[in-house]
Image (cartoon, rainbow, N blue to C red):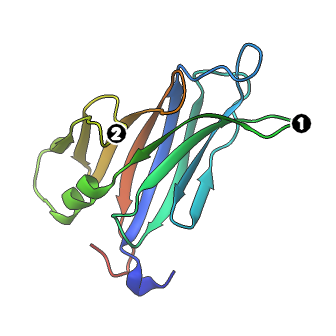
């Protein structure tokens, strides 16, 4: 990807999974895959845990903020294909719009925008876009689809890149 098309980086902090589905006998060995366009990133596997704490940062290069980002949770299997444990999709449009505002001088941890859960997104609860220490963050809890239970908690953080097109 060339620098002139690059708007910036999106750091996705994959915090934890909550009440994930059982895919092995009594538990699962979950990991998360995040995809956007041709980019594909993965967390480590957490063994035998339905409420895994990944606390891992994955970074996507953003050239078109309208490209949907998908999240897939899998159960790592030794001798067969990894089992699907649900998926979700999220839109960074509202987050990118908030970053573009380039707000300054606000009290720390000001909520810039709220994103409501709706049929079009996988949010389990209201998501806040917050300005903290001069940086924009969005915490989101995604309800997994195509599965009996499970949520994944994420935090988005925008990173400007010197020399890129920028927002």
Query: Is 134 on the left-hand or right-hand side of 44?
Result: left
**Hey, which residue is sitting farthest top in the picture?**
26
Residue 48 in picture, x, y percent from top left: 72, 22
Label annotation for residue 58 = none
Q: Quadrant of the C terminus?
A: bottom left
Q: Counting other residues with Cα less than 10 Å from the Cα at mark 2, is it few (<14), some (14-19), or many (20 or more)?
A: some
Label 2 SS: strand
Q: Counting other residues with Cα less than 10 Å from the Cα at mark 1, is it few (<14), some (14-19), or many (20 or more)?
A: few
Q: Is residue 38 above or below residue 14?
A: below
Q: CA distance from mark 2 to mark 1?
A: 36 Å
* Closer-to-camera residue (44/78): 78
Residue 17 in picture, x, y percent from top left: 53, 29
According to the image, label 1 marks what residue? 79
| Residue 109 lies in quadrant | top left
Q: Is residue 12 above or below residue 125?
A: below
Is the C-beta separation of discs 2 and 1 under 8 Å? no
| Residue 25 lies in quadrant | top right
Sequence order check, earlier mark of 2 and 1? 1
* Closer-to-camera residue (56/67): 67
Q: Residue at x 37, y 70 (%)?
A: 64
Label annotation for residue 139 = 2
Residue 160 in picture, x, y percent from top left: 35, 69
Q: Is residue 146 above or below residue 2?
A: above
Q: Residue at x 51, y 58 (%)?
A: 59
């Amino acid at each position: 990807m060339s620098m002139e098309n690059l708007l910036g980086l999106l750091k996705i902090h994959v915090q934890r999974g909550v009440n994930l589905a059982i895919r092995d006998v009594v538990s699962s060995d979950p990991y998360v895959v995040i995809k956007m366009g041709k980019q594909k990133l993965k967390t480590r596997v957490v063994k035998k845990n339905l409420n895994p704490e990944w606390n891992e940062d994955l970074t996507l290069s953003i050239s078109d903020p309208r490209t949907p980002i998908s999240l897939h949770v899998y159960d790592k299997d030794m001798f067969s294909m990894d089992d699907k444990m649900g998926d979700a999709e999220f839109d960074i449009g509202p987050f990118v719009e908030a970053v573009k505002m380039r707000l300054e001088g606000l009290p720390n941890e000001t909520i810039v925008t709220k994103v409501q859960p709706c049929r079009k997104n996988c949010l389990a609860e209201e998501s806040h876009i917050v300005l903290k220490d001069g940086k924009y963050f969005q915490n989101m809890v995604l309800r997994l689809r195509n599965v009996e239970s499970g949520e994944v908690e994420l935090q988005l953080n925008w990173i400007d890149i010197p020399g890129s097109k920028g927002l």
